[in-house]
Image (tube, rainbow, N blue to C red):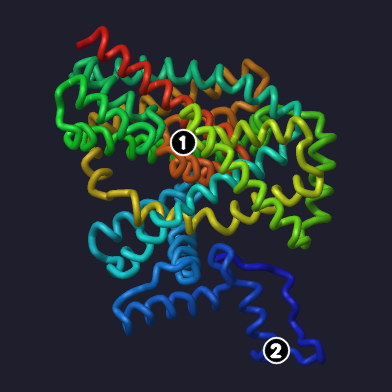
């Protein structure tokens, strides 16, 4: 629970130490769970459980779900933040995602809440709105030089990290008694496959066709590894964030490269002036949604994942000065809103709807953990040192390397939340979606034509 200082102690008429309204206002302003004032947080919990208790169900409409996801998301996140030691290493993102998953599995979260949250998440695809607002906002806040050079340079540490990670992972698997084939295709490759929808499922289809396996069995072997790799990436992101606080010269706090700061300073001033302009905020949301629609059309035309197509469209808009500084500022405010107020509710919904706890538990064998940790750590460490040689901020580049082991878009959100560098979402999407697609396609091509 956070506490805000310098609150007003007296009422407008000069009366002090009265609970109503000044004392009540003090509780609203000074004590918070996440971004929610503590009294409102308590009332939200009462309303949710009263609805479930008296009616036996919970509506899945957006009004009720905003309250529900905010209540549980910030509760789990606050719990993670307050854990000793690990609380400063990404535990908030882990708890916001995996505590709900465990509660669902053990039946400790009321069924109406589980059903309503799952329906809301799957019917609305709210994650896509979150990702598009984060991507567009972060791109619009970058200066043009950093944007261009960052996208050109980030592929080098990404590629080097994947090569080293694959070698180390396979080598460790062999040392532990596994075959190189099993280690690579069922442990190392799923980690770098780009998540569930873009990674685990295509891999299971490929394995079923090439190896003659049942697709369900193949998915059952691959999926736990994807999730455990994502969990390892979250922990690494939290550790990198802590390292950045200890050694500030190694990080740009969300920037990949040093910049002259002129354009960024101008954008920052513009944003400060536009914070209370509701119409410009609305324009920022609309811009993000329209660019995502461009990505959807691109996906239908050329097969490029919609978030990646949207990312490229946003880059073009930024580089060609396609929108005014006011709308750029609106996009940045939208980004800040989603980063601070929507992240933990989204992670809660992800944990309830699409994170099967039993799959994660199945992956917790000593051999799997050693191979996965060695693979992810070597991938991240390689990204760190290669980026440093290229004149990039090594910690921020290493965070992108963490995302190469994430669970797609949801994994990127969790890792960047743990690292406190949501500004890196555009680069994370490149690492996860393009990098994962390349890994899956090339590996299945080699498997089908040379190894079977």
Residue 430 % position (x, y): 53, 29
Q: How crowded is the residue under tag 2: few (<14 C-alpha within 10 Å), some, or many (20+)?
A: few
Residue 269 % position (x, y): 84, 48
Which residue sits at x=63%, y=84%?
24
Q: Could you say which disc has been placed on residue 226 in the image? A: none
Number of marks: 2
In whole angstroms, how far apart are the C-alphas of marks 1 and 2? Answer: 47 Å
Q: Point out the residue furthest to the front here.
A: 301
> As drawn, is 216 to the left or to the right of 123?
left
Q: Could you say which disc has been placed on residue 236 in the image? A: 1
Q: Say if 144 sits above or below 67 in the image.
A: above
Q: Say if 162 sits above or below 247 in the image.
A: above
> As drawn, is 408 to the left or to the right of 264?
left
Q: Please tell me whether mark 1 sits on a helix, a strand or a loop.
A: helix
* Of pointers 1 and 2, the one earlier in the residue sequence: 2
Which residue sits at x=44%, y=80%?
47
Image quarter hosting the N terminus: bottom right
Residue 201 % position (x, y): 30, 34
- Report the front residue among 203 and 142: 203
Q: Which residue is mark 2?
A: 17
Residue 128 % position (x, y): 50, 47
- Report the front residue among 222 and 308: 308
Q: How crowded is the residue under tag 1: few (<14 C-alpha within 10 Å), some, or many (20+)?
A: many
> As drawn, is 55 to the left or to the right of 23?
left
């Amino acid at each position: 629970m956070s506490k805000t200082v310098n609150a007003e102690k007296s009422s407008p008429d000069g009366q002090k130490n009265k609970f109503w309204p000044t004392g009540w206002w003090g509780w609203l302003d000074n004590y918070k769970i996440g971004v929610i004032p503590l009294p409102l947080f308590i009332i939200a919990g009462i309303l949710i459980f009263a609805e479930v208790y008296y009616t036996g169900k919970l509506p899945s409409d957006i009004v009720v779900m905003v309250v529900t996801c905010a209540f549980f998301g910030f509760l789990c996140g606050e719990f993670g933040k307050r854990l000793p030691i690990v609380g400063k290493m990404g535990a908030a993102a882990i708890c916001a995602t995996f505590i709900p998953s465990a509660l669902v599995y053990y039946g400790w979260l009321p069924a109406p809440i589980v059903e309503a949250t799952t329906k809301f998440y799957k019917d609305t695809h709210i994650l896509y709105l979150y990702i598009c607002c984060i991507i567009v906002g972060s791109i619009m806040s970058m200066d043009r030089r950093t944007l261009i050079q960052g996208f050109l340079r980030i592929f080098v540490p990404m590629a080097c990290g994947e090569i080293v990670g694959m070698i180390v992972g396979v080598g460790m698997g062999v040392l532990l008694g596994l075959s190189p084939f099993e280690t690579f295709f069922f442990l190392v490759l799923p980690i770098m496959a780009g998540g569930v929808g873009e990674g685990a499922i295509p891999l299971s289809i490929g394995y079923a066709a090439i190896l003659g396996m049942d697709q369900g069995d193949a998915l059952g072997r691959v999926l736990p590894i994807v999730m455990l790799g994502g969990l390892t990436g979250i922990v690494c992101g939290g550790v990198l964030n802590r390292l950045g606080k200890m050694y500030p010269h190694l990080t740009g706090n969300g920037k990949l490269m040093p910049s002259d700061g002129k354009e960024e300073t101008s954008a920052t001033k513009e944003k400060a002036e536009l914070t209370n302009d509701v119409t410009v905020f609305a324009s920022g949301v609309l811009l993000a949604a329209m660019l995502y629609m461009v990505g959807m059309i691109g996906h239908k035309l050329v097969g490029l994942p919609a978030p990646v197509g949207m990312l490229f469209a946003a880059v073009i808009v930024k580089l060609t000065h396609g929108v005014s500084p006011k709308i750029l500022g609106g996009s940045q405010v939208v980004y800040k809103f989603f980063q601070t107020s929507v992240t933990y509710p989204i992670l809660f919904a992800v944990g309830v709807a699409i994170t099967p706890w039993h799959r994660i538990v199945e992956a917790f064998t000593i051999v799997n953990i050693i191979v996965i940790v060695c693979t992810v750590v070597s991938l991240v460490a390689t990204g760190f040192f290669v980026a440093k040689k290229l004149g990039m901020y090594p910690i921020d580049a290493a965070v992108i390397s963490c995302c190469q082991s994430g669970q797609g878009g949801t994994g990127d959100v969790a890792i960047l939340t743990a690292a406190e560098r949501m500004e890196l979402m555009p680069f994370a999407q490149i690492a996860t979606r393009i990098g994962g697609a390349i890994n899956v396609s090339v590996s299945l091509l080699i498997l089908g034509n040379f190894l079977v």
